[in-house]
Amino acid sequence: MAGLPMYDLAPVRGAVDAWWAGLARACQREGLEGVPGDLWRTGSREDLWRAPELLLSQTCGYPLLKHFTDHLTLLATPIYGADGCDGPTYRSLIVVAADSPAKDLEDLRGGICAINDWDSQSGMNVLRHTIAPLARDGRFFGAVKVAGKHHLSIAMIGEGEADVAAIDCVTHGLMARHEPSSLAGTRVLTMTDAAPALPYVTGAATPPDDWTRLRAALDRVMADPDLAMVRGDLMIEGFADLSLDDYHVMLEMEAGAAAKGYPTLR
């Protein structure tokens, strides 16, 4: 099985498929067998990440550390060219309505916050870390709504159903490049602190020799001139070799918020 669910947005679905086609060819040239021809897009991504037959996927570092270390093995960390990225790190953009009077984070007190999911680094954990110094008695927002996806959080702001959301800067960059109308009625207020970008992973059952072939396949697709346009469309500029220890900054953000009396985003 193979799936790339994290940036599989409708405007770039064709580019994601082309990226996988190139990756699949690279995997085969590295000697991997049973490489799937199509990406998995059915069921929940959690089912994909727990599948013992998983060959390749991309996940969020926060749930990887919290729930999937027994199921997934880190392959590499992508380097993106979006505003807010620096090498293999990325930030979230704190987005508000275009006509919001907010000039800083304090101005958002008591507002409605939209998040993509409770286990998201970019949509929840880093926002909790950012807001923690401002919270009073463990609270800052008037309400928190779960939109389900980053682009739905942005839509809620544009439609007046929420006041603020933290949006993965790569998602925001892809939307700005390929579907700028989807950002209508919103603006970026500020950025959060950085953390390692969303890692490429394989299943924990993948043999070490196959791990080596997969890592070589990632280098191969970065050097493939036929994939230059696809890499540009997806803003992928390379891969870095980070460790799980590098991702622990996300758990430090969680612990830091709790130490400030703000264990739950609210």
Image (cartoon, rainbow, N blue to C red):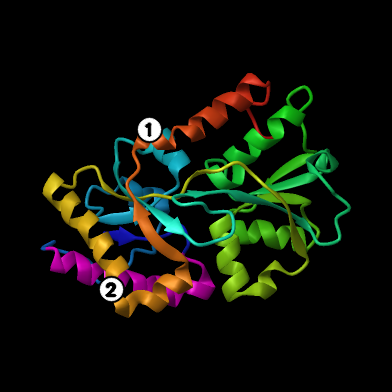
Instruction: Pick the residue in front: 182 or 129.
Output: 129
Residue 232 point in image, percent of width and height:
45, 72
Residue 83 position (above or below residue 109): below
Residue range in magenta is 8-30
Q: Is residue 120 visible?
A: no
Name the residue located 72 percent from the left edge and 59 percent from the top edge. 156
* Number of marks drawn: 2
Residue 186 point in image, percent of width and height:
75, 62
Name the residue located 19 percent from the left edge and 64 percent from the top edge. 27
Name the residue located 55 percent from the left edge and 43 percent from the top edge. 194
- Residue at the spot of label 1: 245
Query: Quadrant location of the N terminus?
Result: bottom left
Disc sitting over residue 224 in the figure: 2
Instruction: Pick the residue in front: 1 or 257.
Output: 257
Q: Is residue 158 left or right of residue 243?
A: right
Query: Which secondary structure is most common in the magenta stretch?
Result: helix
Name the residue located 28 percent from the left edge and 56 percent from the top edge. 56
Residue 90 position (above or below residue 141): below
Asked whether 111 falls inside the magenta stretch, the response is no
Circle 2: residue type: Asp
Q: Secondary structure at mark 2?
A: loop
Q: Nearer the viewer, mark 1 or mark 2?
A: 2
Residue 189 point in image, percent of width and height:
75, 52
